[in-house]
Image (cartoon, grey):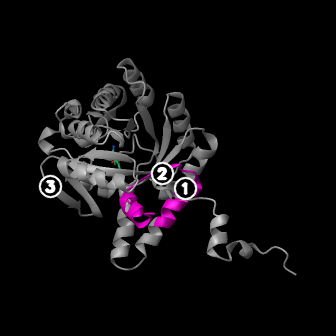
Amino acid sequence: MITHRPRRNRKNQAIRQLVQENQVHVSDLIFPVFVNEGKNKKTEIASMPGIYRFSLDLLLKEIESCLKLGITTFAPFPNIAEKLKNKTASESWNKKNIYLRSIREIKKQFPEAVLMTDVAMDPYSSDGHDGLVKNNEIINDETLSILARMAVAQAEAGTDIVGPSDMMDGRVGFIRNQLDKAGYQQVSIMAYTAKYASAFYGPFRDALESAPKFGDKKTYQMNPANSKEALLEAELDSLEGADFLMVKPALSYLDIIQQLNENFSLPIAAYNVSGEYAMVKAAAQKNWIDGQKIRDEMLLSMKRAGAKIILTYFAKEWALDHKK
Ligand code: PBG
């Protein structure tokens, strides 16, 4: 006789939902968006079907339609003209740059929209690296002052959360300190805590035209083979005052999400990155997979692993498909 029949809890949709442990909510999602100069311009990113670089006027419309779908939080990234890039990324704190203008304008038109802005040199760096380059090396400590200057400029423009994505040592503490000194105690920090040196970022670098001009990012981003290092990074970011810990990419790093969630009290975010999006879209276009179902299963796996928040290019289409 079979006494234990787990199938009883799967026998119909209502019971399956009663026992369902995890669920994705629209309020869990952060939508990364790309902005560039111009007017009335919208360019699809070849390797990210359905994702565009918007001029600011169109980005505002995009944000408005996402807010109506219940998406509350956006992570803008800038595509900066090559001629404005230099060694020190000085365009990043130019008050008139497209990024800071966008932050000001979005917060002015939609004060309820939450912005998480990117703090790293690569969009503005003529070397295409996240830190200052000297003799082909990425210099840690001098990069920190640049990052802090960028973070304060974004805070001044009205951002809610800064997201240092550079993986320099000590940047969370340094940025926290400089934000506080400038009077921005209320601006949060979402630390890119465990950011791996990953091939999954390819399509994003297409979108920003920000690929490294030489070498790779392995002296600052983490080795995909390691997990203890993620715990160390999380410990440091927590001690330095981070408000959220992020794991990036998400899908190949679900074990890291789980470990951070089990070991730390801060909310964990997962970044479902560009390459993860591109793979689903490419296979779905060929009708090799059911793109919507794969998307939903992937996002659910991140929640099950322990992510409270998911940054995903799927945010808008997910919200459209799950509209109440
Ligand atoms: C760089 C940055 C990257 C992403 C966000 N910020 C790429 C990189 O480290 O080269 C990737 C996001 C994605 O792939 O979706 N500061």
Q: How many residues crowd around disc 3 within 10 Å: few (fewer than 14), some, or many (20 or more)?
A: some
Q: Earlier in the sequence, mark 1 or mark 2?
A: 2
Task: Answer with the quarter of the image where residue 199 lies.
Answer: bottom left
Residue type pointed to by label 2: Asp
User: Which of 102/250 is in front?
Assistant: 102
Contact, CB < 8 Å: mark 3 with mark 2?
no
Residue type pointed to by label 3: Lys
Contact, CB < 8 Å: mark 1 with mark 2?
yes
Q: Position of residue 10 (x, y in %)?
A: 68, 74
Boundaries of the magenta span: 296-324
Please name the residue that numbered disc 2 is placed on.
28
Please name the residue that numbered disc 1 is placed on.
303
Say which of marks 1 and 2 sits in front: 2
* Residue at x 24%, y 58% (from the top left corner): 52
The answer to whether residue 9 is left or right of residue 22 is: right
Residue type pointed to by label 1: Lys
Task: Answer with the quarter of the image where residue 44 lies.
Answer: bottom left
Please name the residue that numbered disc 3 is placed on.
41
In the figure, 303 relative to 140: above or below? below
User: Which of 13/271 is in front?
Assistant: 13
User: Is 162 in the magenta?
Assistant: no
Q: Position of residue 315 (x, y in %)?
A: 39, 57
User: Is 318 in the magenta?
Assistant: yes
